[in-house]
Image: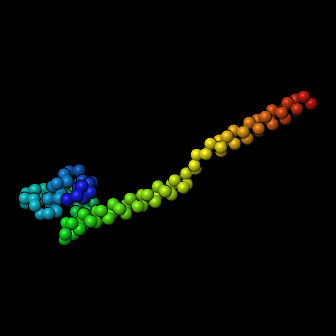
């Protein structure tokens, strides 16, 4: 099976390794090991639901194509979000900083001039 499927299965449960889950899906485990896996899955409701959904696929190659499609969709959505964030972010333009500094300096100079005129009067 592909590495993507193994990655997905690894997040189901920390108590069961990836290969054991794959063998469980393919009914290649001995009965004692099956019962042990089922006992662990009963403790983790999310893992049980995910494994139940995966087991409904008749063809295991169908799982691989589904994982590939989900990964493509996820990448597209993440790329759109990234582009949107980049549009919202202010582009660094050095002239904005220069103009802001010049305006602040003019305000300070004007304040000093007005203050000195008032003190001289």
- Left of 20 or right of it: where is 53? right
Q: Quadrant of residue 40?
A: bottom left
Q: Residue at x 77, y 38 (%)?
A: 106
Q: Position of residue 35 (x, y in %)?
A: 11, 59
Q: Please, which residue is most extreme toward the top here?
A: 120
Q: Is residue 49 visible?
A: no
Q: Quadrant location of the N terminus?
A: bottom left
Q: Please, which residue is most extreme toward the right here?
A: 121
Q: Quadrant location of the C terminus?
A: top right
Which of the pair 60/16 is nearer the observer?
A: 60
Which of the pair 38/90 is nearer the observer?
A: 90
Q: Residue at x 26, y 54 (%)?
A: 7
- Left of 69 or right of it: where is 30? left
Q: Quadrant of residue 111?
A: top right
Q: Residue at x 19, y 71 (%)?
A: 58
Q: Is residue 72 above or below residue 15?
A: below
Q: Quadrant of residue 34?
A: bottom left
Which of the pair 22/43 is nearer the observer?
A: 22
- Colour setup of the view: rainbow
Q: Position of residue 11 (x, y in %)?
A: 27, 54
Q: Position of residue 71 (x, y in %)?
A: 33, 60
User: How many numbered callouts?
Assistant: 0
Q: Residue at x 17, y 58 (%)?
A: 22
Q: Is residue 12 above or below residue 102?
A: below
């Amino acid at each position: 099976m592909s590495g993507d499927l193994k990655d997905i299965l690894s997040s189901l449960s920390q108590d069961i390794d990836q290969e054991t889950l794959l063998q469980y899906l393919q009914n290649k485990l001995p009965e004692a090991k099956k019962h042990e896996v089922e006992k662990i899955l009963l403790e983790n409701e999310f893992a049980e639901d995910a494994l139940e959904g995966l087991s409904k696929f008749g063809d295991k190659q169908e799982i691989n194509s589904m994982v590939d499609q989900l990964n493509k969709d996820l990448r597209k959505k993440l790329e759109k979000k990234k582009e949107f964030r980049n549009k919202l972010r202010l582009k660094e333009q050095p002239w904005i900083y220069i103009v802001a500094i010049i305006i602040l300096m003019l305000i300070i100079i004007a304040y000093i001039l007005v203050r000195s005129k008032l003190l001289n009067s």
